[in-house]
Amino acid sequence: MAKIGDRISEYVLTEKCGEGGFGEVWKAHHHIFAADTVAVKIPTDRAFVDQLKNEGILQHDLRHPHIVRTLGLDPGGTPPYFVMEFVEGQSLRALLRDRSRLDFRDAADIGVQILEALAFAHSRGVTHRDLKPENILLSLAGPAACERAGTHQALGGVWRVKIADFGLGSVTHHVAQSMYLSGVGGTASGRAMTGTWDYMAPELRRGVCTPDPRQDVYAFGVVLYELLMGDLPIGAFAYPGQSLPAVPQEVDLVIRGCLQPDPKRRYASAREVLEDLTATIESRPLSHAARLLPVERDLVASVPLAQLAPQGVLAFRGGQEIGTLRDLVAVCDAHWEDGKHHLYHGDVESWLRRIGERDLARKAMEAREGHPDRNAALEAFLQATKVAAAPVLDLEVSELDFHDLPRGLARRTRVFASNRGRGWLHGTVTSTQPWLRVLTPVWSGNDAPIDLLVDGDKQPAGQRLEAVLAFQSNGGNATVPVRLTIVPQPARMRVEERRLYLSARGEGGDGFLTIVNDGDVPLAVTASAPLDGVTFAESFPLTVEKRFRLRFSVNLERLRAAGAVPGDRAEIPLTLTGNGGTTVIPVRVEAAPPSAVGHALIGGVAALALWGLGVTDTFLFHVIYLFGLFRLLHKLTRRAETSGTEPAVLERAAERTRTISFWMAFLAAATGLLVLWPR
């Protein structure tokens, strides 16, 4: 699992931008050139590595202002990664989430840039096959940044479009064979259905996997419709030129030419769509729509699908026609997303009124307006028909026994609420005790995960705890007893100093390690070092109840004699092992810079010799006397501050040596002047 600070190739991860079933997308910067910002895609599922490779290869060959550039790729790395251009902004999906729908000028500006990118890709024989708002990235630049004259300025700037995620893309000419054989794109016949259902061309839904630019044309038509209407063209829908006065009626013909179910009656490429959309913006005649829609070219507004169905029949996507309530329940169960769309757009309500079910029409309206969850709303309405069987709650566990939980620790688990009946299951779960926290109190789905957290904090050791989880759902209610015992926390060793720096003067120096026991059980510790010059002041095993300061000594002379230290610096790992774990603390030992430390005893011996010879009132005696005295004091205090957790301790030790040497020289000179001063 990647984390902030990890380095991928030449880039350091700084911020997670998003994640999903495929993996994660990170913002990163170059480890030297910090201003170079990129996006790094890291798959967490190995099944997506081939898709990542395909995406990187296709985007690398597509150098276009409106296609995200590939900067690096290594599908065989650890982890596999794909480095691409970072777009500072938001996705088109995020923009639609904020603004619901766009005005015609904004939608047309974004649409033209999308088509320019697709037309370029199609000219290189590449289809995207997963075009949707999530894969369209937007940045907002100032007017001066717009390179295309006359581009509409949105919110004081210019929308700059970049298309990403060519992971499901394929080549459409003879290169396809070599790519399939190399494993980039799978096989033309055996490749699984790819893309996103709502933006997928009908032939793709039927399992036709041959790459075709007209598949991207269909997806673009859905995107353009969603930009203008704020919704998807599913079921019974009206075209924007029919519903919105500010939208030119010719836009309907462009969208109709994109959304034709028959690929032969659809625009052949993004270039044709671009030419007609540009003509619409500039109020010129369309070049291709008349050829595609010869019968309907004079029809400006389309007729909603619900009106095309016979009286008393509700048409679903895929051609299913609903004539009875039982048909409605069966088709909604088989095409749940379609059912939600029809309910929330009033199609079900209108159909019910046409067949005389006014009470059910009112209940459809109440379900739509009374449930924020569309799944729960559809299920509530289907239950109101009295012909739909109820969901059935099925829990995977009948009880939860956590057995022993160490005091102060927490344990997380997940249970699943499954539906053994039809329809959609949803409900709530509560706990009877504060130590049993429900992280998913409201859940929805036919195999819904419910996360639980058992918190042993503030619970005394030896206590037996019991609680009950209460499930309430539209598929029935259930209770699950939960039990556990709080036990003493095992010994847990923690050393406050993660690394130690030791300044050794003379033959060596002392250091200290602070050992902390975060558990309830006493900690038994044994310390060791791989070199003979390290000794410990304590005997082992050492028992630590809560906290202990371990003293050790390093003898540089013995290390040098053993040949373990080539110079005045050594890196010694100290290993602490016990029932609370094992910790290795690196200790860096460095000899202090040469000063007068080694001369302290020499000065004292020389002073005694001169005194014995009767030389007691000379400059030389006082100099040697003071020199020996101060160096002796310095040697005695040498062990007071010789270790620390920061590298600066070595510099501070050297500075202290220089300071004491300076003041000794100063006092010696002053004493000499006093001795030689004429009396």
Image (tube, rainbow, N blue to C red):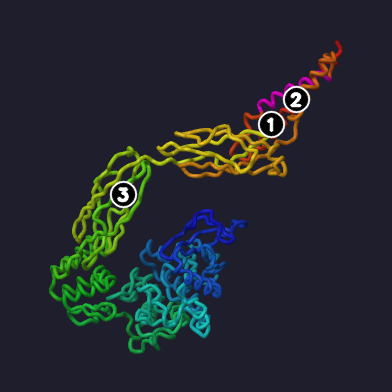
Q: Which amino acid lies under the numbered mark 1 shown in the image of this protein?
A: Arg
Q: Which amino acid lies under the numbered mark 2 shown in the image of this protein?
A: Leu
Residue 351 in the figure: left or right of residue 660: left
**Is mark 2 in CB contact (under 8 Å) with mark 1?**
no
Q: Looking at the picture, how far across and down is residue 480, in whole percent?
A: 23, 52
- Residue 21 part of the magenta-drawn span: no
Q: Is residue 238 visible?
A: yes
Residue 32, picture quadrant? bottom right
Is residue 27 or residue 421 the one in the foreground? 421
On the rendered image, what quadrant is the C terminus found in?
A: top right
Instruction: Measure how far apart labels 1 and 3 are at the Cα level.
Output: 58 Å
Q: Earlier in the sequence, mark 2 or mark 1?
A: 2
Instruction: Please tell me the numbered disc located at residue 402.
Output: 3
Q: Earlier in the sequence, mark 2 or mark 3?
A: 3
Is residue 556 or residue 286 the one in the foreground? 556
Instruction: Measure how far apart labels 2 and 1 are at the Cα level.
Output: 19 Å
Q: Looking at the picture, how far across and down is residue 287, in whole percent?
A: 44, 85
Residue 537, picture quadrant? top right
Q: What range is drawn magenta here?
A: 620-637
Q: Looking at the picture, how far across and down is residue 488, in whole percent?
A: 36, 39
What main secondary structure does the magenta stretch of the protein show?
helix
Instruction: Tell me if mark 1 has few (under 14), some (14-19) or many (20+) residues whose alpha carbon lies within 10 angstroms of its own.
Output: few
Q: Which residue is mark 1?
A: 656
Q: Which residue is mark 2?
A: 601
